[in-house]
């Protein structure tokens, strides 16, 4: 289990150096990924891994579609829906390479993700733990007090948690997370009904909060 903020699905990310494509400014794309809460480095590696599996005559449009998938893989939460919608537009070996999962797991990943934003093939092995957020500010994290009072919010993949007197909003999925300081305590979520129920777990004296989804026996 990691002891710093991070995603357990990201322990063996794709690697590589992307190839320049006419009409696609890779430097600008990386900056956009960073500004949207993702990692430019992870974006470049994911894109490169996907490009390595593309045919030599792949169109620019196909590479642009792949870049959107790579951006999601790099932690941009806002690209999730678009990336899932376009996975079928990319050859399976390419999509799997960009996501860093086995091609044999791609169909299950796409299907499960539509209902459970925290699923990936290795989640059961991690006992349902998905990612750690926050961390001690003195070690590069976000918080100066341990998190407590974690609760879900109405939006899928969103939670609230308190550190000291400050409330925070946490948004997350399998690849990325985002923290936002709040001015006041947020309202408690309404009943979400059926489906996978994710929680944000906190532990005494720990500066990390964990997204957790119970795995069926």
Image (cartoon, rainbow, N blue to C red):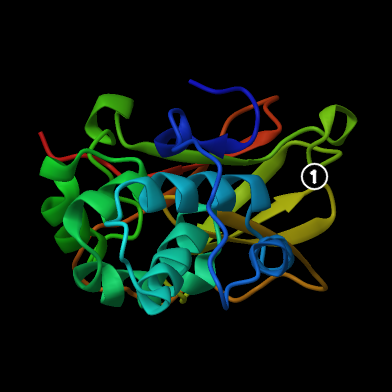
135 to 161, vertically: above or below: above
Residue 57, percent from left and from top? 31, 65
Residue plotted at (58% across, 30% down): 203
205 to 143, vertically: above or below: above
Nearest to the observer: residue 48 or residue 190: 48
Nearest to the observer: residue 215 or residue 30: 30
Residue that protrudes farthest toward the front in the picture: 57
The answer to which quarter of the image holds residue 91 is bottom left
Residue 82, percent from left and from top? 38, 77
Tell me the residue that label 1 is attached to: 142
Residue plotted at (39% across, 79% down): 61
Residue 23, percent from left and from top? 57, 78
| Mark 1: few/some/many CA within 10 Å (<14, 14-19, 20+) | some
Residue plotted at (64% across, 51% down): 39
Residue plotted at (12% across, 55% down): 107
Q: Secondary structure at mark 1?
A: loop
Total residue callouts: 1
Q: Quadrant of the C terminus?
A: top left
170 to 15, vertically: above or below: below
The answer to which quarter of the image holds residue 194 is bottom left
């Amino acid at each position: 289990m990691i002891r710093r903020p991070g995603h357990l699905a990201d322990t063996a990310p794709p690697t590589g150096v992307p190839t320049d494509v006419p009409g696609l400014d890779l430097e600008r794309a990386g900056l956009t990924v960073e500004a949207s809460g993702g990692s430019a480095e992870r974006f470049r590696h994911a894109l490169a891994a996907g490009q390595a599996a593309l045919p030599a005559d792949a169109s620019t449009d196909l590479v642009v579609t792949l870049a959107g998938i790579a951006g999601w893989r790099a932690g941009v939460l806002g690209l999730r829906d678009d990336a899932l919608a376009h996975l079928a537009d990319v050859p399976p070996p390419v999509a799997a390479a960009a996501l860093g999962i086995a091609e044999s797991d791609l169909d299950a990943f796409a299907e499960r993700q539509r209902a459970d934003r925290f699923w990936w093939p290795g989640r059961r092995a991690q006992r349902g733990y998905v990612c750690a957020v926050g961390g001690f500010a003195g070690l590069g994290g976000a918080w100066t007090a341990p998190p407590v009072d974690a609760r879900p919010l109405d939006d899928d993949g969103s939670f609230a948690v308190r550190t000291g007197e400050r409330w925070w909003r946490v948004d997350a999925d399998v690849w990325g997370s985002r923290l936002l300081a709040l001015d006041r305590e947020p309202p408690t979520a309404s009943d979400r009904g059926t489906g996978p129920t994710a929680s944000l777990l906190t532990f005494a004296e720990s500066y990390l909060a964990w997204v957790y989804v119970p795995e069926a026996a």
